[in-house]
Image: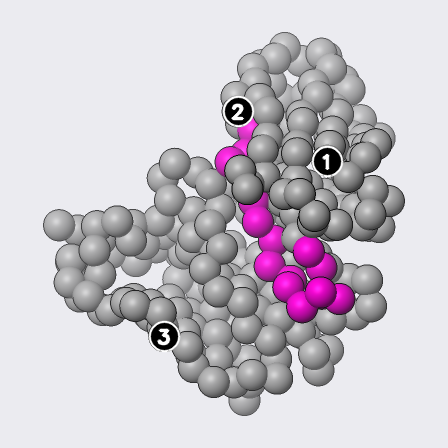
Amino acid sequence: DAGVIQSPRHEVTEMGQEVTLRCKPISGHDYLFWYRQTMMRGLELLIYFNNNVPIDDSGMPEDRFSAKMPNASFSTLKIQPSEPRDSAVYFCASSLGRSLGNTEAFFGQGTRLTVV
Amino acid sequence: AQKVTQAQTEISVVEKEDVTLDCVYETRDTTYYLFWYKQPPSGELVFLIRRNSFDEQNEISGRYSWNFQKSTSSFNFTITASQVVDSAVYFCALSEANFGNEKLTFGTGTRLTIIP
């Protein structure tokens, strides 16, 4: 398996623009997570899905952020409008889930977002 | 609430020395999972190990070993005979076993530098 695939790897955008980050989880994994990494806040969970359904979105910073998972092999994280403070590395991860005995999440390579 | 503390922000050792990275956690659950991840300079997050709260056996994998002690709520990671390729940021993480709760709470990470 190719692992978790994120695109783009790097994104530079102007304040106010819409940004869409994409993620393809590992095939067969039924949990998908979006994390954000910044120097100030470290790694923080934004939202996660189970079987395409959002389970916990309490980490989503504000209404400018939205995430969808239309099917088992694709998820998006959208920021509209973007702000400079959204600059961070955004990671997508997937896992099989505890019910199957595996709890470890496997991460994509991340998308480095810069909002100028 | 769950919390993970990695008190060592940065560590530098000379190649071939042993080094231990500390991790202390807090949780109200009696069942939980602990993890270590490695983030090399390239930026991806690499899963290293998972340990569940029922299993206090120490684990060794090559030059890596982990010491889990419930009595002190610690899950420390030791690298023996360190190598330059071990230079990375290492994260300890915790997942509580509440039904449906699959999210990871990360520590702030320890930046390890191996000096040639």
Q: Nearer the viewer, mark 2 or mark 3?
A: 3
Per the image, the residue denoted by label 3 is: B60
Between the residue at mark 2 and the residue at mark 3, the CA separation in whole angstroms equals 34 Å
Q: Residue at x 28, y 67 (%)?
A: B63
Q: Where B29 sits versus A72, above or below?
A: below
Q: Is residue B94 left or right of residue B56?
A: right
Which one is nearer the viewer's eye here, A88 or A83? A88
- Residue A67, percent from left and from top: 79, 33
- Residue A87, percent from left and from top: 59, 27
Of all residues shown, which one is farthest toward the bottom?
B71
Q: Is residue B81 left or right of residue A4?
A: left
Q: Residue at x 17, y 51 (%)?
A: B115
Amino acid type indicated by mark 3: Ile
Disc on res. A105? none
Secondary structure of residue under mark 1: loop
Disc on res. A9? 2
- Residue B109, percent from left and from top: 46, 55
Q: Which is nearer the N-term, disc 1 or disc 2?
A: 2
Q: Nearer the viewer, mark 1 or mark 2?
A: 1
Magenta range is A96-111
Q: Could you classify mark 1 by the number of other residues whose Cα lies within 10 Å: few (under 14), some (14-19), or many (20 or more)?
A: some
- Is disc 3 on the same chain as disc 2? no
